[in-house]
Image (cartoon, grey):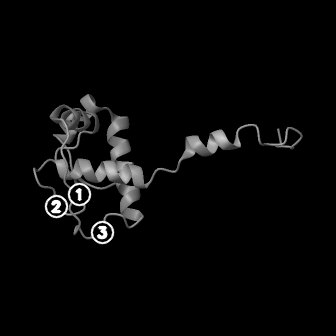
Amino acid sequence: MPKVSTKKSAPRGKLSMVGHEANIGKIGVSAASRVTAIMTAAQHSGLLGEKRARIAGRTSPELIQRAKQQTGIATDTDLIEFALASLALDDNFSETFRKTMSSVDPDLKLGF
Protein backbone atom coordinates (compact mmCIF):
# COMPACT_ATOMS: atom_id res chain seq x y z
CA MET A 1 0.00 0.00 0.00
CA PRO A 2 1.52 3.35 -0.99
CA LYS A 3 2.41 5.77 1.76
CA VAL A 4 0.10 8.73 2.09
CA SER A 5 1.56 12.18 2.61
CA THR A 6 -0.15 15.08 4.30
CA LYS A 7 2.22 17.58 2.67
CA LYS A 8 0.82 20.15 0.25
CA SER A 9 2.95 18.75 -2.54
CA ALA A 10 3.42 15.02 -2.22
CA PRO A 11 6.61 13.36 -3.39
CA ARG A 12 6.39 11.73 -6.81
CA GLY A 13 4.28 8.59 -6.77
CA LYS A 14 2.64 9.37 -3.42
CA LEU A 15 -0.89 10.60 -2.98
CA SER A 16 -1.43 13.69 -0.86
CA MET A 17 -4.46 13.35 1.37
CA VAL A 18 -5.95 15.81 3.81
CA GLY A 19 -4.73 14.83 7.30
CA HIS A 20 -4.97 11.16 6.36
CA GLU A 21 -4.94 9.67 9.85
CA ALA A 22 -7.06 12.48 11.34
CA ASN A 23 -9.67 12.36 8.58
CA ILE A 24 -9.91 8.61 8.04
CA GLY A 25 -13.07 8.53 10.14
CA LYS A 26 -14.56 11.45 8.24
CA ILE A 27 -13.91 10.06 4.78
CA GLY A 28 -14.42 6.46 5.81
CA VAL A 29 -12.15 3.49 5.50
CA SER A 30 -13.87 2.38 2.29
CA ALA A 31 -13.24 5.75 0.58
CA ALA A 32 -9.59 5.75 1.62
CA SER A 33 -9.24 2.11 0.57
CA ARG A 34 -10.86 2.84 -2.78
CA VAL A 35 -8.49 5.73 -3.47
CA THR A 36 -5.50 3.60 -2.49
CA ALA A 37 -6.70 0.61 -4.55
CA ILE A 38 -7.31 2.68 -7.67
CA MET A 39 -4.02 4.52 -7.45
CA THR A 40 -2.13 1.27 -6.77
CA ALA A 41 -3.80 -0.37 -9.78
CA ALA A 42 -2.98 2.66 -11.92
CA GLN A 43 0.66 2.48 -10.80
CA HIS A 44 0.86 -1.24 -11.58
CA SER A 45 -0.79 -0.65 -14.97
CA GLY A 46 1.87 1.86 -15.92
CA LEU A 47 -0.58 4.78 -15.99
CA LEU A 48 1.35 6.92 -13.52
CA GLY A 49 4.60 7.37 -15.40
CA GLU A 50 6.47 10.61 -15.90
CA LYS A 51 4.22 13.63 -15.51
CA ARG A 52 4.63 15.50 -18.80
CA ALA A 53 1.02 16.20 -19.81
CA ARG A 54 -0.93 19.19 -18.60
CA ILE A 55 -4.69 19.49 -18.23
CA ALA A 56 -6.64 22.64 -17.44
CA GLY A 57 -10.27 23.48 -17.07
CA ARG A 58 -12.80 25.34 -15.02
CA THR A 59 -15.30 23.82 -12.64
CA SER A 60 -17.20 24.88 -9.57
CA PRO A 61 -15.25 25.17 -6.32
CA GLU A 62 -18.06 23.28 -4.59
CA LEU A 63 -17.51 20.27 -6.85
CA ILE A 64 -13.79 20.26 -6.13
CA GLN A 65 -14.31 20.67 -2.38
CA ARG A 66 -16.90 17.87 -2.23
CA ALA A 67 -14.67 15.53 -4.23
CA LYS A 68 -11.76 16.26 -1.90
CA GLN A 69 -13.95 15.65 1.14
CA GLN A 70 -15.27 12.38 -0.29
CA THR A 71 -11.83 11.05 -1.19
CA GLY A 72 -9.60 12.71 1.39
CA ILE A 73 -7.33 13.92 -1.41
CA ALA A 74 -5.70 17.27 -0.65
CA THR A 75 -4.36 18.63 -3.94
CA ASP A 76 -6.10 19.45 -7.20
CA THR A 77 -3.43 17.57 -9.16
CA ASP A 78 -3.89 14.38 -7.12
CA LEU A 79 -7.67 14.71 -7.39
CA ILE A 80 -7.50 15.00 -11.19
CA GLU A 81 -5.07 12.07 -11.34
CA PHE A 82 -7.40 9.95 -9.20
CA ALA A 83 -10.43 10.87 -11.32
CA LEU A 84 -8.62 10.05 -14.56
CA ALA A 85 -7.28 6.78 -13.14
CA SER A 86 -10.80 5.82 -12.04
CA LEU A 87 -12.06 6.30 -15.60
CA ALA A 88 -9.06 4.64 -17.23
CA LEU A 89 -9.36 1.53 -15.05
CA ASP A 90 -13.14 1.19 -15.32
CA ASP A 91 -13.94 -2.37 -16.39
CA ASN A 92 -17.50 -1.59 -17.57
CA PHE A 93 -18.82 -4.32 -15.27
CA SER A 94 -22.41 -3.05 -15.18
CA GLU A 95 -22.63 -2.83 -18.98
CA THR A 96 -21.14 -6.30 -19.42
CA PHE A 97 -23.43 -7.69 -16.71
CA ARG A 98 -26.53 -6.27 -18.45
CA LYS A 99 -25.43 -7.69 -21.82
CA THR A 100 -24.88 -11.18 -20.41
CA MET A 101 -27.94 -11.29 -18.14
CA SER A 102 -30.02 -14.42 -18.76
CA SER A 103 -27.42 -15.76 -21.20
CA VAL A 104 -26.31 -18.76 -19.11
CA ASP A 105 -27.93 -22.00 -20.19
CA PRO A 106 -30.39 -23.00 -17.42
CA ASP A 107 -29.40 -26.67 -17.88
CA LEU A 108 -25.73 -25.94 -17.20
CA LYS A 109 -24.42 -28.03 -14.27
CA LEU A 110 -22.71 -25.64 -11.84
CA GLY A 111 -21.67 -28.25 -9.30
CA PHE A 112 -24.17 -27.44 -6.56
Q: What's the residue type where badge 1 is placed?
A: Lys
Q: CA distance from mark 1 to mark 3?
A: 12 Å
Specify the quadrant of the image occupied by residue 112. top right
Residue drawn at (22%, 57%) of the image: 55
Image position, residue 49 (x, y; %): 30, 69
Residue sticking out furthest to the front: 58
Please identify, in this view, whether the residue under mark 1 or under mark 3 is nearer the observer: 3
Residue drawn at (52%, 51%) of the image: 91
- Asked if 1 appears above or below 51 in the picture, the reply is above
Crowding around mark 3 (Cα neighbors within 10 Å: few <14, some 14 to 19, many 20+) is few
Q: Secondary structure at mark 3?
A: loop
- Considering only order in the chain, which callout, 3 or 2, is on the residue closer to the N terminus? 2
- Labels 1 and 3 touching (C-beta < 8 A): no
Crowding around mark 1 (Cα neighbors within 10 Å: few <14, some 14 to 19, many 20+) is some
**In front: 46, or 37?**
46
Q: What's the residue type where badge 3 is placed?
A: Gly
Q: CA distance from mark 2 to mark 3?
A: 14 Å
Q: CA distance from mark 1 to mark 2?
A: 6 Å
Q: Secondary structure at mark 2?
A: loop
Image position, residue 65 (x, y; %): 18, 34
Q: What's the residue type where badge 2 is placed?
A: Pro
Residue under label 1, please give it: 14
Which label belongs to residue 53? Answer: none
Residue sticking out furthest to the top: 26
**In front: 61, or 23?**
61
Please identify, in this view, whether the residue under mark 2 or under mark 3 is nearer the observer: 3
- Labels 2 and 3 touching (C-beta < 8 A): no
- Considering only order in the chain, which callout, 3 or 1, is on the residue closer to the N terminus? 1
Residue under label 3, please give it: 49
- Labels 1 and 2 touching (C-beta < 8 A): yes
Image position, residue 71 (x, y; %): 28, 39
Residue under label 2, please give it: 11
